[in-house]
Image (spheres, helix red, strand yellow):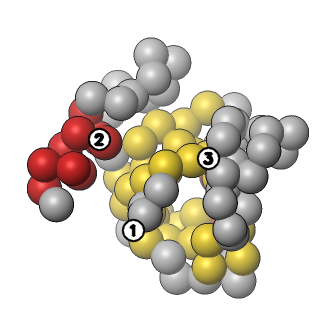
Amino acid sequence: MDKLRNHLLFNDRESDELDTMPEFGTVIPSKLNIRTGPGKDFEKAALPLTEGTKVIILGEQNGWYHVSTEITGWVAKKYIKIN
């Protein structure tokens, strides 16, 4: 599990994302769409994340967080509480 986490956090980062260590967050609303890119016009990557889901924040772009949980995708920043 540690090997997978390190691979996701440090090897799959896009160049336009933050160069800081990842933070952890929690989904605030009862359901939160996770998308393939940083915007509501991108396709949904999976079923919505549910309230209380823990995420690793990999980066930020234009008010959206690139997050990792069971999958990796983008969520609107305003719906994530930083832990």
- Above or below, 67 relative to 60: below
Disc 2 crowd, CA 10 A, few/some/many (<14, 14-19, 20+):
some
Mark 3 = which residue?
Answer: 74
Give residue 53's position: percent from left, percent from top.
50, 76
Residue type beneath disc 1: Asn
Q: Earlier in the sequence, mark 3 or mark 2?
A: 2
Q: Which mark is residue 25?
A: none
- Tell us which disc is closer to us: 3 or 1: 3
Where residue 37 appears, as percent x and y from the top left, is 67, 36
Query: How crowded is the residue under tag 1: few (<14 C-alpha within 10 Å), some, or many (20+)?
Result: few
In the rendered image, the vertical position of residue 48 relative to residue 38, given as above or below: below
Question: Which residue lies under the disc numbered 1?
Answer: 83
**Residue 62 shows up from this direction:** yes
**Residue at 43%, 71% in the rendered image:** 54
- The residue under label 2 is 9
Check disc 2 and give the amino acid type. Leu
Q: Earlier in the sequence, mark 3 or mark 1?
A: 3
Distance Cα–Cα, label 3 vs label 2:
14 Å
Q: CA distance from mark 3 to mark 1?
A: 18 Å
Q: Quadrant of the C terminus?
A: bottom left
The label nearer to you, 1 versus 2, is 2
Q: Note whether 80 is above or below 23 in the view shown.
A: below
